[in-house]
Amino acid sequence: MYNQRIMKKIAFTTLGCRYNRLESAELAHELDQAGYTQATAEDGPADVVVINTCAVTGKSAASARAAIRAARADNPAARVVVTGCYSETSPDDVASVEGVDLVLGNAEKFSMTQALRKLDNHPEGEALVLVAHGAMPERLPVRPVTGMSGRTNAYLNVQSGCDEVCSFCVVRIARGKSRSASAAELVEQVQRLSDAGIKEVVLSGINIGQYSDGDTDLATLLEAVLIRTDITRVRLSSINPNNVTQRLIDLMALESRFCSHLHIPLQNGSDRILRLMRRPYTSVMYEDLLNRLAERIEGIGLGADVMTGFPGETDEDFGMTRSLVERLPLMMMHVFSYSSRAGTEACSMPGAVVRARAKERTAELKAISDMKRREFISAHEGKELDVLVESSRTAGGKLKGFTANYIPAVFEGPDDMSNSMVRVTGWRAKEGALECRLSGGA
Ligand code: SF4
């Protein structure tokens, strides 16, 4: 029925991480070039719905299936395309959900227009599955993204895939080997974003510390971006502790445009569990790194991911994690309970932790994280800070933005301060943010 129809309106549902959101933005640009426009809420049903899925937890698969059903119900005549990590790891499961027309792996998603054309010759009511596992290009292309006007910051994918072997991780199965984008193209892209009015670029990747383009590692790439572009700020998304080099620390200490903020996954404070997880560092290495960072870079904002309930985690192991994170100079933690993922090594490890116990441990660490966050933000009361002001205001009508060390700041101010750097003085910590006043008595 819809074979002859020209399909124009496309809608996206993106689940999971920032990396997926970035890829959806890149896809939107590519489809825009091919004549599709993004459907808005007022447009009614779309002609194509793309669901970019995640596979990190057991819940991700359920969320993906719910999103597929909602897409089909809201857009009865649309082509429903499912891509992302859930499609890559479990294509048959995805294809079996009623209403799916096309299943694309992570490598195939950027050939979506060709794949949509193939659907025209495919029997209706049966999903077309195009997933060639492992067929990733050697070099990560630098893709432009759309929707930048009026935006203050932009994410830039510099790396994808991963060469580590963490036993709980399904991402490395879904994303393949590590590959990186060309440093020269990335530098050009940052300058283009800056020319388009973007003030802050966040360099992202699946395991960004493995960035490598010939002799250019991550620190060299950052140096090139800082020297060869006039971007106001550069930030890193998340980096593993074993990849935080002394050069990177020195660069952050010397360059105020390189935001003093790092999110460094810890995962666990017990060396026995870290070994089972196949994480390439120990708790002592992690603690030493964070202490060095805090000593060298004043006010640095440090975040961590911590996982509770990994198979075999005893009360004693958990006690080590708790006392380690209490000691660490962290401003926040992202704490979550382990969830088993098919195809991973941890999936068949003995010693499953009862769910309720893992949840208790998660709650305990979240309380520590909340306390550390309050303390970190309160320590900035009375201090002068530079805030990059975003274009939208808070629900209460205040300007908002982030400091270099990633404190959300809110304050009264005029519209023309949007998308610019302003100096404020911290007033009081409130609800996870810092209420500020414009410096200079404004
Ligand atoms: S470093 Fe470990 S957790 Fe991160 S993507 Fe690679 S294998 Fe997965």
Image (cartoon, grey):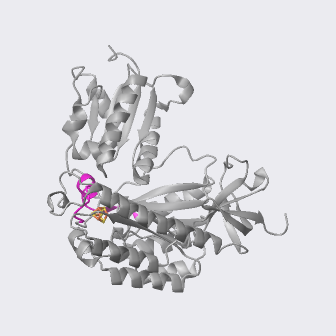
Quarter, ligand 1? bottom left
261 in relation to 23, above or below: below
Magenta residue check for 342 = no
- Comparing 165 with 246, the one in front is 165
- Look at the image and give the residue range highlighted in magenta: 166-182
Residue at image coords 60%, 75%:
256
x and y percent of residue 38 in the render? 49, 33
Residue at image coords 34%, 75%:
319
- Comparing 4 with 234, the one in front is 234
x and y percent of residue 78 in the render? 38, 23
x and y percent of residue 414 in the render? 79, 53
Magenta residue check for 175 = yes
**Does residue 281 appear to the left or right of 374 in the view shown?**
left
Q: How many marks?
A: 0
**Does residue 318 appear to the left or right of 235 in the view shown?**
left
Residue 238, can we see it? no
Residue at image coords 58%, 81%:
298
Using the rendered view, name the quadrant where residue 204 is placed: bottom left
Residue at image coords 23%, 28%:
127
Tell me the quadrant of the picture where the C terminus can be found. bottom right
**Does residue 375 appear to the left or right of 333 in the view shown?**
right
39 in relation to 218, above or below: above
- Comparing 279 with 374, the one in front is 374
